[in-house]
Amino acid sequence: MRCHRGYVVLCVTLLFLTWNAVLVFLLRGRFPDQEGKRGPDDYNGEVVAEMLGVADMLEAELEIQKKILTQIQNFHPALGPWQKKKPKPAPPPVPILVMACNRVTVRRCLDKLLLHRPSAERFPVIVSQDCGHTGTADVIRSYGSEIMHLMQPNLADIDVPPEHKKFQGYYKISRHYRWALKQVFNNYSAVIIVEDDLEVAPDFFEYFSATLPLLQSDLRLWCVSAWNDNGREGFVDPAGSLLLYRTDFFPGLGWMLLRELWEELEPKWPAAFWDDWMRQPEQRHGRQCIRPEISRTLTFGRQGVSLGQFYDKYLRYIKLNSGFVPFTQLDLTYLKEDAYKKSFLDEVYAAPVITFDDIQNGVREGNGPFRLQYSSKESFKAFAKNLGIMDDFKSGVPRTGYRGVVTFFSRGHRIYIAPPPGWTQYDPTWN
């Protein structure tokens, strides 16, 4: 095939050169010897007219030859000094799946998504509604073709153990998630899940666009989250909008997963409490999520099945990133597991050890970072509670933890709450 193509190109090139030689011969023939006597004025006028005609013909012919040469070069770029680059294929669409129920305030969530969305084709918005609440459905429908509205068909109560009767809502949420994710993954290879009480940051879509290739290529990652559990104002680096981390803790609250993970989880999806189930070692298998220093989502939903758990003390004070970070233009390879693990742990264990009293009294040498060392669940919880960060564990993993280390800002300094050097694994009994 290549030989045949090369032969054709050679023939076309020879024809091109031959035609130009013939053209020169013909044009020279346009000036025959002049016979007879002519006056100088007649002779000069004829020559000028003849030359102008020839110039017009040459210009027209050169345009034709230029087009022919361009076609040859496009057919075989090696014959010319330039090559046409193949256009990059458009990235596959990643839908935003908004999980809704009975909050008419879903409008705030949708308004921000549509405001910051860079492309409707790249990020279609799908709202999956449970509960059958008419007012919420009317709000969702008011957006017309800007979004897709799905209605979870099974609204019946679920048979639950008597001691779980008050948790009926958690069972319905888990059922809704399973149904909605199944619908979406019939058509897409990745999805970003947003609850109806979340507001997104201006660079929310940019953040997920940049981290999607990492999620697809790193088998030790299983999600990307927009949320920092300890991301309250005063506990994050105000200049740290570019900072991203790996975490062993599943954050949720605006997160992305791939179809491959859903195919793994769907057959054993739990009847209730799906988020805590995700945090169990049987599901996590030592994998991590990416999360930001400054959150790209903010929850405004105090009312819900959790009855405002943590909201008044922590969640309402989460700092939402207000600027735009061009993540897709940044080198994020530092987040790959091997490089990240070494760099992160080197920094943690090179930091000088201080005490809680040192932090309280401002007794430090240098600008940090600094390390607080814990040796038990009780010592970690004491540090966390007194410093004002979240102190709970899920299957032995503290919120935002990576290899047992929790990082945050305190009084303008980076602090690591870390286990002793040589840490190997979490203790699932720490709950």
Image: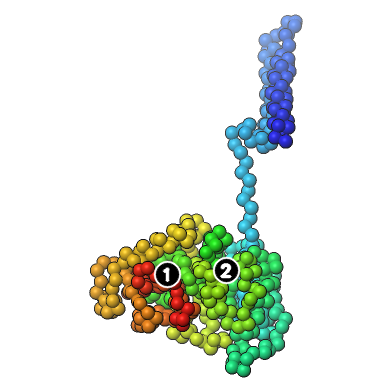
Q: Are marks 2 and 1 in contact (CB under 8 Å)?
A: no
Q: For the point 64% across and 36% down, which residue is it? A: 77
**Amino acid type, residue under disc 2 in the picture:** Met
Residue at the spot 67% in from the left edge and 89% down from the top edge? 159
Give left or right: position of 242 versus 361: right
Q: Is residue 77 above or below residue 117?
A: above
Name the quadrant of the N terminus: top right
Does dot 2 land on a helix, a strand or a loop? strand
Image depth: mark 2 or mark 1 in front? 1
Q: Is residue 127 visible?
A: no
Quarter-wise, where is residue 238 in the image? Answer: bottom left
Cα gap from disc 2 to disc 1, whole angstroms: 28 Å
Could you tell which of marks 2 and 1 lies nearer the N-terminus? 2
Where in the figure is residue 11, as x and y percent of width and height?
A: 72, 27
Residue at the outermost top position: 36
Q: Position of residue 342 (x, y in %)?
A: 40, 61
Give how far across and how far down residue 124 sits, in percent.
Answer: 65, 67
Left or right of 35, for residue 347 = left
| Amino acid type for the residue under numbered disc 1 | Thr
* Residue 256, disc: 2
User: Which mark is on residue 424?
Assistant: 1
Point 61% across, 68% down: residue:
261
Nearest the camera: 169 or 66? 169
